Amino acid sequence: MDLGYINARVRGMHSRLLGPKAFDALMVQQDIPSLASELEKTPYRDEIQEAGVLYPGLKGIEAALRMNLVHTCQKVLSLVEGTDSEPLVQIILARWDIHNLKTILRGKHLHVAPEEIEECLIPAGTLGEPLLVELIKQPDVKAVIDLLATWEVEYSKPLTNYIDEYASGRELSVLEYALDRFHYENALSRLRKGKSDHEVMRSLLCQEIDSLNLKNALRMNRDRVDPETAEKYFLPGGEHIPLDKFLAVVRSGRVEEIVENVEGTPYSFLAPLIPEAMRTGTLSVLEKELDRYLTRKGTGVFRSDPLGGAVVIGYLFAKQNEIINIRIIARCKDARIPDAELEKELRYV
């Protein structure tokens, strides 16, 4: 399919994303029923009505958002099939595979009921809903990994390599790290050097890796993890947080040292926030700022080359941004959180 036609279709989809006025209308709603009614005035109407028949209250809205995201991802993937943009879309959608596998593994690790696990899944990646349902039925973490291996799912290899370490220490983080490392190494290996769209995707992936490494380094510093252990969780492939800087943040005995290691990088915007976050041990404000930064970078590529594949990348980032914001609004309304606090909770604006 002609890339110009694809981009025209995607631009049309982008034009239907909710604008500031629509979000203002959602935020002033007093409860879940009124929020659902307001969402029926948006492109989410069909999913809201369908999910509302099956699930009450907040569950209905979250089910509708999942349905809409899955439909959107499938539509975009069908549009780019057979073009140079297909691997870029597959890389973005693979995030949902990682999300779903981590959710299932965490659920099995913590002995969460299958129906609760299923409510948290978003089958927008390559792993379809039937496969995910079968994984949920497995009795424990090892059985999930064994089934993935039986079906020759590519994610089984990194998990199988770390299953013994998980079994000996019962640290789920080793399996989550294995998935993250496999995802980024696999994604970067699929990109072609010198091709502009692929270089845009490479830059975004490298910044995601930097962000994950920085988040982990800050947590490990707070929790006093020894550098030798921390090094095992370093993700290669970033641009501005190499291993030596990662370990320097982990080792830092003073907050000033952490700030020094962040300054001079694209993440220097965190510097004013670090002292209070480290003092109180609440790193969520730093993590939210990193998430906002990545979202701005991702959505920003939509306005790059109008004839390039970056338009599709930017749209998918913007769509995820929208879904997350609506979900935050719904959860805050359900918990009766004041509007002033709700605005602070919005991750991406």
Image: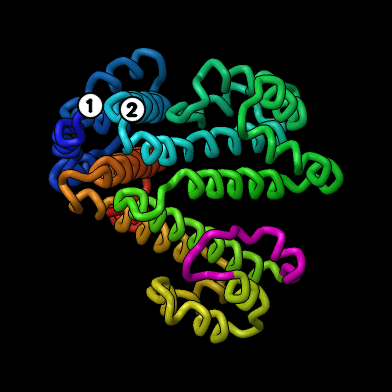
Dividing the image into 4 quarters, which one contains the C terminus? bottom left
> Do tag 2 and tag 1 residues touch (Cβ < 8 Å)?
yes
Above or below residue 18? Residue 256 is: below
* The magenta stretch spans residue 238: yes
Dividing the image into 4 quarters, which one contains the N terminus? top left
Mark 2: give few (<14), some (14-19) or many (20+) Cα within 10 Å: few
Quadrant of the image occupied by residue 23: top left
- For the point 36% across and 34% down, the residue is 86
Q: Main secondary structure of the magenta part?
A: loop
Q: Where is residue 199? Give x, y as percent.
A: 36, 54
- 182 lies left or right of 322: right
- 128 lies left or right of 88: right
- 232 lies left or right of 316: right
Q: Earlier in the sequence, mark 2 or mark 1?
A: 1
Which residue is nearer to you in this view: 154 or 20? 154
Asked whether the viewer can see residue 64, the reply is no
Q: Where is residue 269? Give x, y as percent.
A: 38, 74
- Residue 1 - label: 1
Give the Cα separation between the discs numbered 2 and 1.
8 Å
Above or below residue 143? Residue 347 is: below
What residue range appears in magenta?
225-242
Q: Where is residue 271? Give x, y as percent.
A: 44, 78
Q: Where is residue 140? Give x, y as percent.
A: 75, 28
* Numbered-mark total: 2
Which residue is nearer to you in this view: 112 or 87? 87
Tell me the kind of residue under disc 2: Gly
Which residue is nearer to you in this view: 190 or 161? 190
- Residue 82 - label: 2
- For the point 68% across and 40% down, the residue is 158
- 42 lies left or right of 119: left
* The magenta stretch spans residue 163: no
- For the point 23% across and 30% down, the residue is 39
